[in-house]
Image (cartoon, rainbow, N blue to C red):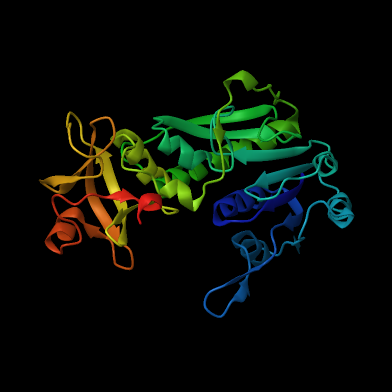
């Protein structure tokens, strides 16, 4: 098939490679404009652009998909299908309808769960034990199109976003190949989503990583796992900030004290009093401006002390 590929970040790169390696003709790759990076603010190509240039594909980097020139470039490429993986822009209906098979998107959840910009992160935040990858037809709605194929994946105990993303990409690449093959052969029948079962995964902000210690420990564990590497989970200790890098809800542990209090060092973890009498076992932290360290090293280095009260960043005076 003639495939116009739209994608931008590193996560989209294996999918472009897979489309190319499967023998599909890719007349056009659309990605976001180069952005300044580093101290010298030199414009850097997107990861998708880098791969496209390496394998000799034509790259188009429009500032907006809503300009008439965008649609014209797509039409001129005569695509049978558009493949969209983390492009980062909402496509107008005219663009979605420019190919015979429409536009196929790879989404990192089991739709209709976790529609939106950050499905991997929010699945971890909410303590899900199973997630997956969905290929779907794009339409006017936000991740509301018909489902083509899905692949289920267990979330490993204690897993953080980078690891889960990596495994989802590994599962998603063959799923996309199978989807394109099925559409080409006419053997794949789209099925509507149950919109009543939809949940959402909104864009994450820096403030999302600044919870109050009154949040229960299981939810704090989810935040630590889901918001790695960004924005992280931060608390205030006096006039400084400290990030919780690794932690888990301590099974069976309870407290009756003030939320945010450092209760003590238990083996390799610092126990932190959390909401609803729960306790978070913190095994690694990172004081602002310093390297990541074990909880034990943080106590020995006086970055944490028993009796300290960690506060929400927003409440720190």
Q: Nearer the viewer, residue 280 or 147?
A: 280
Name the quarter where the C terminus is drawn: bottom left
* Vertical placement of residue 37 versus 246, above or below: below
Q: Residue at x 38, y 42 (%)?
A: 223
In screen coordinates, is 163 left or right of 213?
right
Q: Is residue 221 visible?
A: yes
Query: Which quarter of the rendered picture does the N terminus lie within?
Result: top right
Q: Is residue 234 above or below residue 280?
A: below
Where residue 172 appears, as percent x and y from the top left, is 55, 40
Q: Find residue 296 and report its horizontal and vertical position in percent.
A: 14, 55
Q: In the image as oriented, which residue stretches furthest toward the bottom?
A: 40
Of 315 and 86, nearer the camera is 315
Q: Is residue 247 left or right of residue 61?
A: left
Q: Nearer the viewer, residue 127 or 238?
A: 238
Q: Position of residue 24 (x, y in %)?
A: 72, 48
Q: Does the image show residue 194?
A: no
Horizontal side of residue 53 vs 253, given as left or right: right
**Residue at (20, 45) in percent of width and height:** 261
Estimate the x, y position of residue 63 in percent, counting from the top left.
76, 60
Count of labels in the image: 0
Classify residue 166 as left or right of residue 91. left
Residue at position x 48%, y 53% from top?
A: 206
Which of the 4 image quarters holds residue 173? top right
């Amino acid at each position: 098939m003639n495939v116009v590929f739209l994608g931008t970040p590193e996560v989209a790169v294996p999918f472009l490679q897979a489309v190319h390696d499967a023998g599909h003709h890719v007349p056009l790759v659309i990605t976001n404009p180069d952005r300044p990076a580093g101290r010298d603010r030199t414009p850097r190509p997107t990861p998708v652009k880098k791969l496209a240039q390496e394998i000799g594909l034509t790259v188009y980097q429009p500032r907006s998909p809503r300009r008439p020139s965008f649609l014209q470039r797509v039409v001129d490429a005569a695509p049978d299908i558009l493949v969209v993986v983390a492009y980062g822009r909402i496509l107008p209906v005219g663009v979605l309808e420019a190919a015979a098979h429409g536009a196929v998107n790879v989404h990192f959840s089991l739709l209709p769960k976790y529609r939106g910009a950050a499905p991997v992160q929010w699945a971890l935040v909410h303590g899900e034990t199973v997630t997956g990858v969905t290929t779907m037809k794009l339409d006017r709605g936000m991740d509301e199109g018909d489902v083509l194929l899905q692949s289920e994946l267990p979330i490993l105990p204690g897993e953080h976003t980078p690891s889960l993303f990596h495994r989802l990409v590994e599962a998603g690449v063959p799923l996309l190949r199978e989807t394109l093959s099925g559409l080409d052969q006419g053997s794949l029948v789209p099925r509507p989503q149950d919109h009543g079962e939809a949940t959402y995964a909104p864009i994450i902000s820096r403030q999302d990583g600044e919870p109050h210690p009154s949040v229960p420990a299981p939810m704090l564990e989810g935040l630590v796992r889901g918001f790695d590497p960004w924005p992280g989970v931060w608390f205030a200790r006096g006039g400084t900030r400290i990030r919780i890098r690794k932690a888990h809800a301590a099974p069976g542990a309870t407290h009756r004290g003030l939320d945010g209090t450092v209760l003590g060092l238990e083996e390799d973890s610092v126990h932190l009093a959390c909401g609803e009498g729960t306790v978070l076992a913190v095994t690694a932290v990172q004081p602002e401006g310093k390297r990541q360290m074990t909880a034990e090293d943080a106590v020995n280095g006086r970055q944490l002390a028993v009796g300290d009260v960690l506060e929400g960043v927003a409440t720190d005076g």
